[in-house]
Image (tube, rainbow, N blue to C red):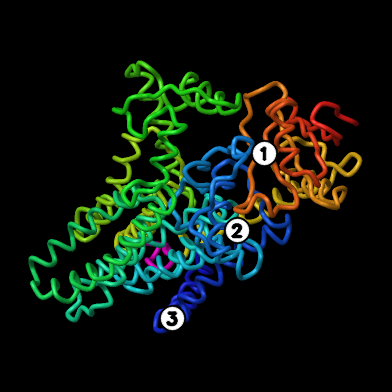
């Protein structure tokens, strides 16, 4: 106890110095989050995409990196269909462009899209710190803000995946940070511009869940404007003026891809492929697919197996699905070593005593409400509420300090113990993540004749490198699955300019159909790749024609 009491004043003095220099503290937090992201990459190499969503985001990033908003439909597009990617009316990712723009930034600056993910996490970290300064004293928010910037990269995996989460969190932090400053005596017009920027980021990342997270902030803006009429000219007019070009650009982006300014790429993809509706009250739409793996993914896995949907939904099944969807939300408590769960009582006290905290809690409740009515649920869907969870953690710690001020354990000591536990949890997670990355790198180095033994999607870059080394004029790889369908990982995914790739990935549609693609690429070497038993192993062979394989 004496050691903690001696450490507390030192921590307090250092944090006070940083709080007096907000730009320095924001830069320190951003740099710390970058370091946390880079350490696992040093041990295990550049993170590899694993799931369909990541390849779709990489397609968007590659498109933007080449200065285009979309790509023309390929004449042989039926060979290149992939989950979450539009082939018609244009060739592009179905997702909003926010994450893809950051991936493009990383690709242009360094050649590695993952660097764009790390940049987004650094921006999110600094933005959460900026947001917390509007709602709490700077010193109370400093340590938790640093953890909030570093932990999602590891605990939620945002720094090791290409589907992100930090972009939506950045938008949410901008909105809540700006709205939290409306109670100041002098409100400058740039506050309205920041709100517009945050809304634009939310709309172009995870619009539904993000708007749920910032909806109470909009209500708070109205309340503050009714109390202080001058905010309309100082905040609302600049915000509206900034939103006009943002909305116009979004309409132009939609029109470039779908042909309609009001129709999202996500909507077009849903109409073409999805069976399960977005909300529970929607109607399922059975479809026919050209590929067995699509039939399995959207049919048996998503609809018939009841993974997300049961027809009819009985109360017991509905409860099971809701519990399954709430689990990702608990991941945000895990970010802080479950401190919010342990400190739920002081949180309720803080909500009761401080009206401003109720607005933050309302944002979390809105996100939970959306999660309960939507069919799909993953942690990064609700990233916009990351700043809200962080703020509630700060409220918990401040309330705990007030409770313990005159007891055996003084306030600063309890604060240091709580933050120390969160730091210990983060360090442990960093060690565990780094170890797993190194283990994966070691497993992929186990090869037979130059090829990895595993048939999992993480081996895709190694297969591509092997084929490229044995194909001087480029190659086409026809991919098939044995048995057909039933595969979680789709190997067929290409960049924005398919014809310019050294290695083109295509579906094996049979010898007769394959001959068309072989004729389209007459100078490329042709290979056949079989993924055996759900990725347990792979078989790669060179074929001389569409009908006669040669081992």
**Picture disc at residue 392:** none
Find the magenta span and give its range: 406-415
Residue 448 at x, y percent in the picture = 89, 39
Q: Tell me if residue 166 is in the magenta stretch.
A: no
Q: Looking at the image, which residue is at 70% across and 34% down?
A: 516
Q: Looking at the image, which residue is at 45% across and 56% down?
A: 97
Tell me if residue 382 can be seen: yes
In screen coordinates, is 305 left or right of 244? right
Q: Nearer the viewer, residue 113 or 369?
A: 113
Q: Looking at the image, is 132 positioned above or below residue 455?
A: below
Pointer 1 with pointer 3, Cβ within 8 A: no
**Picture disc at residue 491:** 1
Specify few, some or many for label 1: CA neighbours under 10 Å numbering under 14, 14-19, or 20 or more: many
The residue where tag 2 is placed is 427
Kindly report which numbered mark, 1 or 2, lies closer to the viewer in this rendering.
Answer: 1
Kindly report which numbered mark, 1 or 3, lies closer to the viewer in this rendering.
Answer: 1
Tell me if residue 421 can be seen: no
Q: Mark 1 vs mark 3: which is more N-terminal? A: 3
Q: Quadrant of the C terminus?
A: top right
Residue 68 at x, y percent in the picture = 52, 60
- As helix, strand or loop, the secondary structure at mark 1 comes to loop
Q: CA distance from mark 3 to mark 2?
A: 25 Å
Q: Nearer the viewer, residue 106 or 388?
A: 106
The residue where tag 3 is placed is 23
């Amino acid at each position: 106890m004496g050691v903690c009491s001696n450490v507390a004043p030192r921590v307090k003095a250092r944090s006070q110095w940083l709080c007096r220099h907000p730009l320095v503290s924001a830069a320190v937090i951003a740099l710390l989050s970058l370091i946390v992201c880079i350490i696992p990459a040093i041990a295990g190499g550049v993170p590899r995409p694993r799931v369909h969503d990541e390849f779709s985001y990489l397609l968007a990033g590659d498109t933007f990196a080449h200065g285009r908003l979309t790509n023309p439909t390929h004449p042989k597009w039926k060979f290149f269909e992939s989950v979450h990617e539009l082939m018609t009316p244009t060739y592009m990712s179905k997702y909003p462009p926010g994450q893809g723009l950051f991936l493009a930034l990383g690709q242009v600056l360094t050649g590695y899209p993952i660097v764009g993910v790390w940049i987004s996490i650094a921006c999110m970290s600094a933005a959460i710190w900026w947001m917390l300064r509007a709602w709490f004293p700077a010193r109370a928010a400093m340590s938790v803000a640093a953890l909030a910037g570093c932990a999602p990269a590891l605990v939620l995996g945002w720094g090791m995946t290409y589907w992100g989460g930090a972009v939506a969190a950045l938008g949410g932090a901008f909105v809540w940070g700006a709205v939290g400053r409306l109670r100041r005596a002098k409100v400058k017009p740039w506050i309205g511009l920041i709100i517009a920027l945050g809304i634009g980021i939310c709309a172009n990342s995870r619009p539904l869940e993000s708007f749920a997270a910032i909806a109470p902030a909009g209500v708070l803006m109205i309340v503050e404007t009714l109390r202080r009429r001058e905010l309309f000219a100082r905040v609302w007019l600049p915000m509206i003026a900034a939103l006009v070009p943002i909305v116009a650009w979004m309409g132009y982006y939609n029109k470039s891809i779908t042909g309609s300014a009001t129709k999202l790429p996500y909507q077009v993809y849903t109409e073409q492929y999805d069976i399960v509706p977005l909300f529970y009250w929607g109607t399922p739409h059975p479809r026919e697919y050209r590929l067995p793996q699509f039939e399995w993914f959207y049919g048996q896995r998503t609809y018939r197996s009841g993974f997300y949907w049961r027809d009819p939904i009985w109360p017991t099944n509905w409860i099971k699905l809701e519990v399954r969807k709430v689990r990702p939300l608990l991941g945000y408590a895990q970010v802080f070593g479950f401190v919010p769960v342990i400190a739920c009582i002081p949180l309720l006290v803080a909500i009761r005593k401080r009206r401003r905290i109720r607005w933050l809690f309302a944002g979390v409740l809105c996100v939970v409400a959306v999660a309960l009515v939507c069919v799909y649920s993953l942690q990064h869907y609700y990233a916009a509420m990351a700043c809200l969870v962080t703020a509630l953690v700060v409220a918990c710690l401040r309330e705990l300090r007030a409770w313990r001020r005159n007891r055996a354990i003084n306030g600063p000591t309890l604060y240091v113990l709580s933050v120390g536990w969160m730091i210990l949890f983060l360090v442990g997670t960093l060690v565990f993540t780094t170890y797993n990355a190194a283990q994966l790198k070691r497993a992929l180095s186990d090869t037979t004749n130059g090829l990895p033994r595993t048939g999992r999607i993480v081996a895709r870059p190694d297969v591509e490198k092997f084929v490229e080394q044995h194909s001087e004029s480029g190659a086409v790889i026809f991919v098939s699955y044995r048995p057909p369908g039933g595969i979680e990982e789709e190997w067929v995914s290409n960049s924005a300019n398919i014809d310019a790739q050294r290695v083109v990935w295509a579906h094996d549609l049979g010898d007769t159909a394959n001959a068309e693609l072989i004729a389209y690429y007459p100078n490329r070497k042709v290979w056949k790749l079989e993924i055996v038993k759900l990725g347990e192993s792979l078989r790669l062979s060179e074929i001389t024609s569409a009908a006669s394989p040669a081992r």
